[in-house]
Image (cartoon, coloured by chain):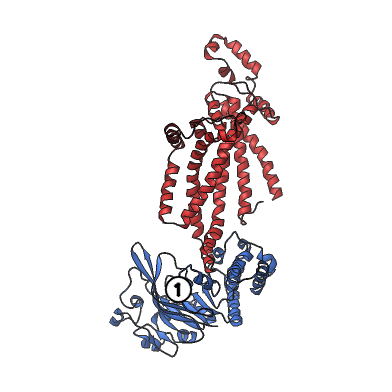
Chain colours: A blue, B red
Amino acid sequence: MDKDTIIEVKNLKTFFYTNQRCNKAINGVSFSVKRGKTLCIVGESGCGKSVTASSIMGLLPKLSRIEEGEINYYSEKHGKLRIDQLEQNGPTMRTIRGGEIAMIFQDPMTALNPVFTVGGQIGENLKYHTKMTARKIRKKTVDLLSDMGIPAPEQRAKEYPHQFSGGMRQRAMIAMAMSCHPRVLIADEPTTALDVTIQAQIFELMETLKKDYGTAIMLITHDMGVVTELADDVAVMYMGNIVESGTVEDVLRKPAHPYTRALLSSIPVLGKGKQQELEPIKGSTPDPYDRPVGCQFQPRCDFATDKCGTAPVEESCGDTHSVMCWHYREVMNHEGK
Amino acid sequence: MLSYTIRRLMILVPMLIIISFFIYGGLELMPGDAVSYMINPEAAAELSPEKLDALRDSLGLNDPFIVRYAIWFKGVLKGDFGYSLSSGVPIRDIVFDRLPATLELSFIALILSSLFGSLLGFLSAIRKGSIADHSLTVIGMIGVSIPQFFFGLVAILIFALKLHWLPVGGRLMPEYVTYWDRFPHLVMPSLVLAATMTAGVMRYSRSSMLDSLNKDYIKTARSKGLPEWRVNLVHGFRVALTPVVVLVGFRLPTLIGGAVVIEQIFQWPGIGNEFITAVRGQNFPLVMMIALFSVTAVLIASFLVDLLTAVLDPRVKLS
């Protein structure tokens, strides 16, 4: 057990129930979030990235349930806590949420409440997690906004979200999330709704926070470029499983899972010109209610054999690198395909 | 804000002039005129057409439409609303006599229905899918679909005729009795009116609250670790409130214009009741004035609603 581990997820299974059908949104996921490190969770839409985040935050919708597995949170105050066993809106979970584990969302345009001032919404976090007086809260709010690189923070704190641009709102969201110096920041596609220059600024900001406060960051994205830039560790998700995980070097340089490999070769490379051939992943994501037998990627996989009819188990393919594929050796050695 | 208010009030003037023109013109299209109302048909049949025409001439009824309109409107501006054709009483006196009764009835109903309607609506949204929510939805459906007159008559049957708890209808004149003597007369009409309105407000505020609770900022609020009551009542409620306030605001004028049905059933001597009598009796001047008052109320209410929305929602800018 690493002393830097803050959150440890073990064989987590979160299922959704609708119309008597069960969607196994997360089907046995394990990973850990470490102090001062960025863990990127990559995968296409609907693969369970956001559900993983919601499970940790205790923000799962009513129709879903954690069926199996553990989410351990190593708190400074309380020691080891089982988040999956805490009441979602109970007092302990509420102190952790926002105070020790904070989250920023995909769309800053809708994530802020339109009828309250930005300063007020940031201050609300401080009000519930610290014992600061109202005046101190106001001062701290202004400080936070100025830390996030927002000009004229005193003026800005009194303004409403609609008076902020998209990038500014995301900064305000980060200020809100960082207000109580959380130990973990979960960012669910924080820049998808922003343009590229603003994206870079936001990531730079997150990097600084990681350095200054040792905040662990769990970044959910589907942008491989972002992964290269920011990640220390990467977990690739497909249909509710982590199919490959390891350090960013491991996963990007020596992809061991056919899905990771396919993802990487589907990215256009800047400078190669418009003649370059992109290789899309063939087929489409299976219906979550009608899953393939065995390996979930098998119907779309170039390496598939009869063996893939049984679900692969997680295997180690390096010191820090693990993969869920029967044919990982072939994938790793298969050059230039 | 101030300049906006002034500008809006200034727009009211031309709007009222145009609307009053249409009201006057609309009534002009009705068959018959003041003379045919003043003289009973048998007497009119005996009078020679020349005499009738002379009578019309003396009353100015043969003047061109525009002239008559101008004379009427000049009077209105001076506060001379004309006389009721049926009783000869100045219309101003009638209106000031009837208005308090209507206001008393409608404001109680408006306040009760806004309070309970929004409260129940928000509660059922927060507890969506619970037994309480389902039963409130059913009650709301019933409340919206049952016509007021039926509801009123059933109430009279039960509480007045069978149980003898409350008077059948009418209103005691405030000059002669204490408020507590008058109060029982007010209970049934105002509660019946409030009940039907509550159903509407409730359904509306439920959907408004549900809408608000599904927004991303609710998830943000939860992710901050706020207690559930604060997530619902501060973040959810505050946004859901604006549309409900707009709905209630737009109800103001209809109440002043008279809760016609309720006033009829309970023989409540309000504007609505007076309006019906005036229309039936071709009492043109009175109909025109009541219509003009209602229109003014609508215009003022929509102006108030705009101001309130701007106060409640920072995204709305008045300019």
Kindly identify the residue that appears in the image at 63 percent across and 41 percent down.
Answer: B300
Is the residue B208 above or below the residue A57 in the image?
above
Viewer-nearest residue: B288 or B162: B162
Figure label count = 1
Given the current orientation, which residue lies at the most extreme bottom position? A319
Is the residue B283 above or below the residue B193 in the image?
above
Does residue B220 appear left or right of residue B304 in this picture?
left
Q: Which type of secondary structure does the marked residue at label 1 adopt?
A: helix
> According to the image, label 1 marks what residue?
A49
Is the residue B76 above or below the residue A51 in the image?
above
Crowdedness near tag 1: few (<14), some (14–19) or many (≥20) residues, C-alpha within 10 Å: many
The image quarter containing residue A309 is bottom left
Is the residue A109 above or below the residue B284 in the image?
below
Q: Position of residue B74 (x, y in %)?
A: 69, 28
What type is the residue that disc 1 sits on? Lys
The image quarter containing residue B151 is top left
Q: Position of residue B157 (x, y in %)?
A: 42, 33
> Which of the chains bears the disc numbered 1?
A
Residue A114 shows in this picture: yes
Q: Position of residue B4 (x, y in %)?
A: 69, 48
Kindly identify the residue that appears in the image at 56 percent across and 66 percent down.
Answer: A108
Viewer-nearest residue: B285 or B115: B115
Kindly identify the residue that appears in the image at 51 percent across and 58 percent down.
Answer: B212
Residue A265 shows in this picture: no
Q: Position of residue B165 (x, y in %)?
A: 47, 35
